[in-house]
C-alpha cells in the first residue's frame, strides 16, 4: 500500500542556545545550522526510511530545490509538491542544553496548498492507503474528506494544536495523534477525548494507544541521552504509520516507532536525524526487544 502525506516542508533554522529565551531577552546563540524540517516533511522522511512508499503532497517557494533533493534522497516521492511564488515555510528553532526546544514557524507556501492540488495527488490513492495530516498546511479538511471517501486510513497529528482545525477534520479521522499537552487541551474543550482511536505521546514517558474496541496499549520509551528532541514526535508517527502500512500489528508498530524516535533524539536536527529501518532493527535487537 502507499502513504500520502499532506504536509509542511520547512527550512529549519536551528540555534543552540544556553537556555530558551525569556520575554524581552536578547540571547547570543552558541551554534547555528540549517536543515530540512516541517512536521510534514519529517513524517514523510520517517515513513520512507521505515520502508514505506510515501508520496508527499505539499508546496514550496523559489530556491527550495535542495529541500526536495534531500526528501528524494531519503526515498520520498516529491512528484506532488507544487512550486509556488510564495516563500518556502521556515522554522526558527531554539534548542537548549537539555535538548528541549521552542519553535516559531512561518507557514509561507505550506498554507497556499489548495483542495484542487490535493485532489490531483489523491487520484492515485486506493482503499487501504493512508493519509497523514498535520496542522501546518491549508486544505486539511478537503484532504481528509477525499481520503475517507476513497477508503483510506486518515491519521491526523493535532500539532500545532488548534481546536477548530481538529474539529474540521475529526469526522474523517481514523487515528488522532497528540502529545499529552494537546490531549489535555482537547479534553478540556470537549469534556472527553473523541470516539476515534487516539495515540497520546508522552516523550520519555512513553506513548499510549487508546481505542474503543480494545484495551489501551502502552509502549514505554527507550532510555537514551537526547541532544535534540526536534522532530521526535514526527519520527514516531511516520514510523508507526509505515509499520502499520507494511502489515505490522499495533504493538510491533508502536515498538518500532518508539525505537526510531529514541534514536532520532540522540542526533541533532529534524529530518536529518531520522534513522533508517536497519538502524531501528539493530537498536531493537541490542535492547533485546
Ligand atoms: O516537529 C518539528 C518540526 O516543527 C520542525 O522540523 C519545524 O519545522 C516545525 O514544523
Image: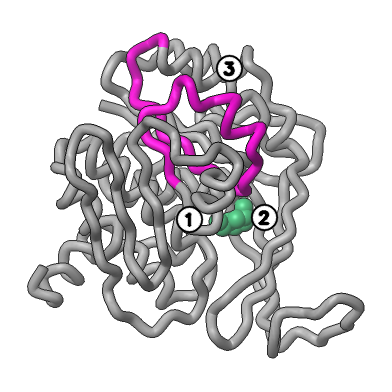
Q: Position of residue 152 (x, y in %)?
A: 35, 20
Direction from residue 146 to residue 23 in the image, left or right: right
The N terminus sits in image quarter: top left
Q: Which mark is residue 59?
A: none
* Number of numbered labels in the structure image: 3
For the residues carrying marks 3 and 1, which lies nearer the camera in this image?
Answer: 1
Q: Which mark is residue 179?
A: 1
Along the viewing direction, whichever of 26 and 116 lies nearer the viewer: 26
Question: How dense is the environment of label 3, judged by Cα within 10 Å: few (below 14), some, or many (20 and up)?
Answer: some
* 91 is higher (above) or lower (below) than 128: below
Q: Residue at x 66, y 66 (%)?
A: 34
Direction from residue 50 to residue 282 in the image, left or right: left
Q: Residue 70: in sight, yes or no? A: no
Q: Residue at x 33, y 81 (%)?
A: 224
Direction from residue 62 to residue 193 in the image, left or right: left
Direction from residue 284 to residue 71 in the image, left or right: right
Quarter of the picture for ligand 1?
bottom right
Q: Position of residue 95 (x, y in %)?
A: 63, 77
- SS at mark 2? strand
For the residues carrying marks 3 and 2, which lies nearer the camera in this image?
Answer: 3
Q: Which residues are magenta?
A: 149-177
Q: Quadrant of residue 36?
A: bottom right
Q: Which mark is residue 11?
A: 2
Q: Earlier in the sequence, mark 1 or mark 2?
A: 2
- SS at mark 1? strand
Looking at the image, which residue sits at the far right? 24
Q: Which residue is mark 3?
A: 142
Q: Residue 217: in sight, yes or no? A: yes
Q: Residue at x 36, y 28 (%)?
A: 174
- SS at mark 3? helix
The C terminus sits in image quarter: bottom left
Amino acid at each position: 500500500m502507499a502513504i500520502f502525506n499532506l504536509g509542511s516542508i520547512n527550512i529549519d533554522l536551528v540555534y543552540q542556545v544556553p537556555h530558551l529565551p525569556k520575554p524581552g531577552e536578547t540571547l547570543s546563540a552558541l551554534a547555528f545550522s540549517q536543515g530540512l524540517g516541517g512536521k510534514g516533511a519529517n513524517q514523510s522522511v520517517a515513513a520512507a526510511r521505515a520502508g514505506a512508499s510515501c508520496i508527499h503532497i505539499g508546496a514550496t517557494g523559489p530556491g527550495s530545490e535542495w529541500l526536495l533533493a534531500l526528501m528524494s534522497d531519503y526515498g520520498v516521492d516529491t512528484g506532488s509538491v507544487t512550486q509556488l511564488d510564495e516563500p518556502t515555510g521556515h522554522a526558527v528553532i531554539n534548542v537548549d542544553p537539555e535538548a528541549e526546544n521552542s519553535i516559531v514557524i512561518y507557514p509561507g507556501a505550506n498554507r497556499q496548498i489548495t483542495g484542487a492540488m490535493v485532489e490531483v495527488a489523491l487520484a492515485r490513492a486506493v482503499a487501504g492507503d493512508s493519509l497523514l495530516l498535520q496542522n501546518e498546511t491549508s486544505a486539511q479538511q478537503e484532504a481528509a474528506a477525499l481520503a475517507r471517501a476513497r477508503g483510506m486510513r486518515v491519521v491526523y497529528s493535532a500539532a500545532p494544536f488548534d481546536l477548530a482545525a481538529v474539529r474540521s477534520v475529526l469526522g474523517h479521522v481514523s487515528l488522532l495523534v497528540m502529545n499529552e499537552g494537546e490531549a489535555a487541551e482537547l479534553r478540556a474543550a470537549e469534556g472527553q477525548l473523541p470516539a476515534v482511536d487516539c495515540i497520546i505521546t508522552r516523550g520519555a514517558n512513553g506513548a499510549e494507544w487508546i481505542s474503543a474496541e480494545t484495551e489501551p496499549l502502552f509502549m514505554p520509551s527507550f532510555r537514551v541521552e537526547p541532544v535534540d528532541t526536534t522532530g521526535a514526535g514526527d519520527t514516531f508517527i511516520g514510523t508507526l504509520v509505515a509499520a502499520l502500512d507494511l502489515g505490522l500489528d499495533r504493538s510491533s508498530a508502536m515498538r518500532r516507532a518508539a525505537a526510531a524516535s529514541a534514536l532520532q533524539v540522540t542526533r541533532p536536527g529534524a529530518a536529518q536525524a531520522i534513522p533508517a529501518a536497519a538502524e531501528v532493527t539493530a537498536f531493537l535487537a541490542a535492547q533485546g526487544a
